[in-house]
Amino acid sequence: MPGKFPNEVLDQNKIASLLSGKRVLDKIRFSEILAKASKSEGLSLEEAAFLLDVESIDDRLALTEAAIKVKESIYGPRIVLFAPLYVSSHCINDCLYCGFRTGSQTPRRRLTNEEIKGDVEAIIAMGHKRILMVCGEDPTIEPRDIATMMQVIYDTRLPKGSIRRVNVNVAPLDTEGFRIIKSAGIGTYQCFQETFHRETYFRMHGRGPKSDFDNRIHVFDRCIEAGIDDFGIGFLFGLYDHRFEMLALLQHIAFLEKNFGIGPHTISIPRLEPAEGANVFETTPWKVSDKDLIKATAILRLAVPYTGIILSTRESSAMRQKLLRVGVSQMSAGSITNPGGYSDESRAVSQFSVQDHSSLDRVIRKVCGEHFIPSFCTGCYRKGRTGSKFQKLAKGQHINEFCSLNAVATLQEFLEDFASPETKAVGEKSVEKFINGQNDGNLKTRMADWRARIKNGERDIPY
Ligand code: SAM
């Protein structure tokens, strides 16, 4: 595989030429690009590069306003919530920025199936319905073991609920491995390239299987071949020039669309955080400012309008509020990033430091307060609306209809079963306002009907 594909995915010369020189922002061109992007038509690589140059407060504002408009037109006010579940901190890689690296002597933990069940029960008890299962590259965990762990998660039940969708972030597998986890009911397979800049990649990942850049960049080729058509991509902001990474990410997406007819289901925007036993956070010359992360997120929303954008608790609560307003559509909440941390207070070493420690209840209250609708919707995945089927619906702007009903239902379930009195009061108002604001009379009636049924004790109403 090495050497066979790389130039097809990335054209580093093109990126370099698009980023070279300091340009003066042409206001007319800027308005033209924003007008086109506001119609959810996406951005060419040149247009994205142009927007990366936007500097003034007014221009940044125009950019972020266009981004939220596009997000609202496709996804409406919904924000999907989930919890990460770390099952092992053992890892054979030496990613210089990561708390799980081989070079760090920090204590590690691998959960037994019983311990996984304990953490899942704690996550369900918070009110979550979606989990992102995460682990280091732990050679003792084979694809069959990942499948078993997923089954443990799906099988864990409390009287008030269960997990309805398991997404997975594990090191790249081969096609057969992907087939195994596909058959266990994976939602989205997620893997970040970390950096698309080869030299930086080799410097950051000198040892272990992750040192193979080509194996990682072609991971989705194998995942799609195995039938997993919901996949999530991203890079770690802070390892290299984020403007280069942004354009490379867009080239990667174009490669996937051209060769497989599908783009990513989600893009994540992780930003480098301090980690125990790793010092890249302290030494990198490529730190990304809040302003630039907001701008980059807005550009991603405009460039790939139909793709979910995922935000984690790496960001502070204040920053998460800002990023919500530029097109983020999914976020983790109440996260713990060390294995066993949800059910066991001992807190083994985390992968990186988390900034937003708010509980799920508090996050829901805040999200509602910002006039968004928190959702635990899993309808599309359960109904087989994945990959190109989902993207077709989103492009026809139909996804809103399906998901709005499920959003109301799952938020109402949370309010009935898990919310504090304060959150319940705020949430009830949000649901009511959302239902009343619907233009489609049928949908409005159905929402009100489902809400009443949930208040009467029904749960997980089949769509
Ligand atoms: N083993 C899997 C793999 O190889 O992709 C999972 C890696 S890790 C558990 C999940 C993600 O956390 C990484 O892909 C990386 O982007 C991110 N990460 C690692 N160290 C980080 C840090 N110090 N700050 C923020 N994010 C970090």
Image: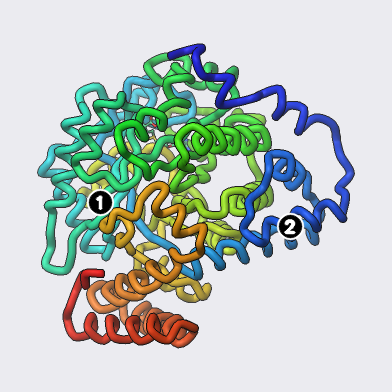
Q: Residues within 10 Å of mark 2 (few under 14, many from 20)?
A: many
The amino acid marked with disc number 2 is: Leu
Residue 280 visible in image = yes
Ligand 1: quadrant of the figure:
top left
Query: Secondary structure beneath disc 1?
Result: loop
Q: Secondary structure at mark 2?
A: helix
Q: Which mark is residue 440?
A: none
Report the mark closest to the observer, 1 or 2.
2
- Could you tell me which quadrant the N terminus lies in? top left
Query: To which quarter of the image does residue 79 belong?
Result: bottom left
Q: Is residue 255 above or below residue 204?
A: below
Residue 290 visible to an observer of this rendering: no
Q: Upstream in the sequence, badge 1 or badge 2?
A: 2
Q: Which mark is residue 34?
A: 2
Tell me what residue is drawn at x 74 percent, y 60 percent. 35
Tell me which colouring the rendered structure shows.
rainbow
| Residue at image mark 1 | 342
Q: Work out whether 196 lies above or below 262.
A: above
Residue at point 51% right, 75% down? 371
Distance, label 1 to label 2, CA atoms, is 44 Å
Position above or below: 210 against 55? above
Q: Is the CB–ligand 1 distance for label 1 below 8 Å? A: no
Classify residue 349 as left or right of residue 352: left
Give the quarter of the image for residue 451.
bottom left
* Residue 239 spot, x, y in % from top left: 58, 31
Q: Marks 2 and 1: in contact by CB < 8 Å? A: no
